[in-house]
Amino acid sequence: MLRFILTRVSLIIPTFIGITLLTFFLIRLVPGDPIETMAGERGIDPARHELLRKEYGFDRPILVQYGIYIARVLQGDLSKSVITQAPVLDEFLALFPATIELAVCAILFALVIGLPAGILAAVRRNSIFDHGVMGISLAGYSMPIFWWGLILILLFSVQFDLTPVSGRIDVLYYIEPVTGFLLIDSLFFSEDEGAFRSALAHLILPTIVLGTVPLAVIARMTRSAMLEVLGEDYIRTAKAKGLSRFRIIALHALRNALIPVVTVIGLQVGVLFTGAILTETIFSWPGVGKWLIEAIFRRDYPVLQGGVLLLGIVVMTVNLLVDLAYGLINPRIRHTR
Amino acid sequence: MTAETMDAPAVAAPTATPPHPLREFWGYFSANHGAVAGLVVIVAVVLVALLADVLAPHSPYLTDTTIALKPPFWQEGGSFTYPLGTDPIGRDILSRLIYGARLSLLIGIMVVAISIMVGTVLGLVSGFFRGIIEIFIMRLMDVILTLPSLLLAIVIVAILGPGLMNSMLAVALIIMPHYVRLARAAVISETSKDYVTAARVSGAGTLRLMFREVLPNCTAPLIVQASLGISTAILDAAALGFLGLGAQPPSPEWGTMLADAREFVLRAWWVVTFPGLAILITVLAFNLLGDGLRDAFDPKLKR
């Protein structure tokens, strides 16, 4: 088992180097002089230009620059935002809980609906329910979620006035960040009862929007994994033994069917961050996705560079954990490689 | 896309001589109603795109503020002159959608063409030469796959600058790993087969082996992936347009149209509803087609 873990961990090193190379060149491939580009129309005087060139290390040979960059990254120094002058890592850590909160709610939403829908569709194969689930999940998979968000706003916020249009919580409430997760902070650390309700109401639409694609993928994957398992000999044996239908499905089939599903859920982390960028933009959700998009328009390259690196590392780590968990659930994987 | 099995009933009646492969293929394909529906929609979108000059009632760029935000014809205040209403600066939405079909198809096809050409060559090269070249190419593809796809596209556009061309290049890059992996896997499984050995023994060079012998035998998965790739390309390019990083106004690209219309969501439902619907229907059609093609190509189902 230790050997398995070590091999898997060592496999991510080249990927890590690749990501750092990408973010390293990101700031250097921008056409023209990066400092002038960042300064934009404000312009910059030559003395300050020279100073910044030194500060960013642009006057050194490229390999030395990369070495310095890696050394700084490993020390947690991701340089400072051009606009706010705050360290990029601090800004990221302040905003990341908002993205995590949204992503966790979205994946829970996708699981709570997607898993049972997929299982039922497989059990009642070729029924109207099955065709319905597959049709809806194909539509969900094809959904432009930036439009889906607008349509939900149109329906629930404009037509029925049920949900707020944007933000994380009503401006009436100020919640001191303790964990950074507003749902938890407002429930346990705030005397105001309306705060939790407000935070919850603000989460509904973004959760649905961000959860739609994972929901579709999970439903489809669960269905096909279940169908495969239900055709296995041991299921026939269980049937022949006279076990109840529920017992066969819930205990025998589901266990094995869940293995590929777990992997798919792990792979959805990347999809979630992609979706978060769009969802946060639509709902003005103050997370890292919106922060990155704003950084592009402000030409705040250090933020973009640091943010991409950090998100890349997060996704890489989650994928690694899924891989390791997969080895734990399924001994066959562990021993064959 | 997840692997899914469909029990399509075999429609080809048993005959003495085996039917032509294309005919047999169509038999399996047409048994899948969803796939046929997808194909019909795609043909319709292609026709609309080709005949845009004839079909569109107005210019997609002509603005007229006196008729701004007219509702569609079935609502009070709407008229058949502007069947789907007008946008905030008085352009006909239907005409813009029709011209937008051109852009979306162009994006989908160009992106997949670039991606498939470069990706297949990289896959063939890494499958044939193995060693350090293969490690380098496949690790690079792993990096691309690790980063959230849209994030990578955004980074590339941030470097190259916003615009239709640059966003197409960015999307082409992020869907490339699929083709590289497919081509490489196909090469590795094919090269051990007898016909490749036979070709090599009779003196075929590596290039000939790669393109004339092996490539034709791994086209099926590439075609399926191409169909699914077009839907991803249209979706991601529209997302970039929506974020203001893709096609720039006044281009009638569907995602860009949505970005322009966003602030009017509270006042005029039609300016946000129709462009998104167009994206959804087109993407859905390509996904249906891709699923249908995969099922029709899947040899397991033919038995």
Image (cartoon, grey):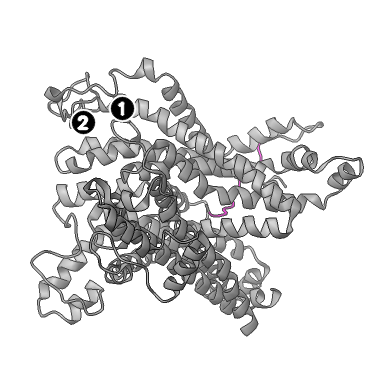
Contact flag, marks 1 and 2 (Cβ < 8 Å): yes
Looking at the image, residue B57 sits to the left or right of residue A124; the answer is: left
Residue A66 highlighted magenta (yes or no): no
Residue sitting at 38 percent across and 65 percent down? A107
Q: x%, y% of residue A202?
A: 20, 62
Amino acid carrying label 2: it is Asp
Where does the image place residue A325, in percent across and percent down from the top left? 53, 76
Residue B19 x/y as whole percent: 75, 31
- In this rendering, does residue A222 appear at all? no
Our reading of the magenta stretch's main secondary structure is loop
Q: Chain of mark 1?
A: B
The answer to whether residue B84 is above or below residue A50 is above
Q: Quadrant of the N terminus of chain A?
A: bottom right
What residue is disc 2 on? Answer: B87
The range drawn in magenta is: B2-11
Q: Residue furthest top?
A: B54
**Picture quarter containing residue A11?**
bottom right
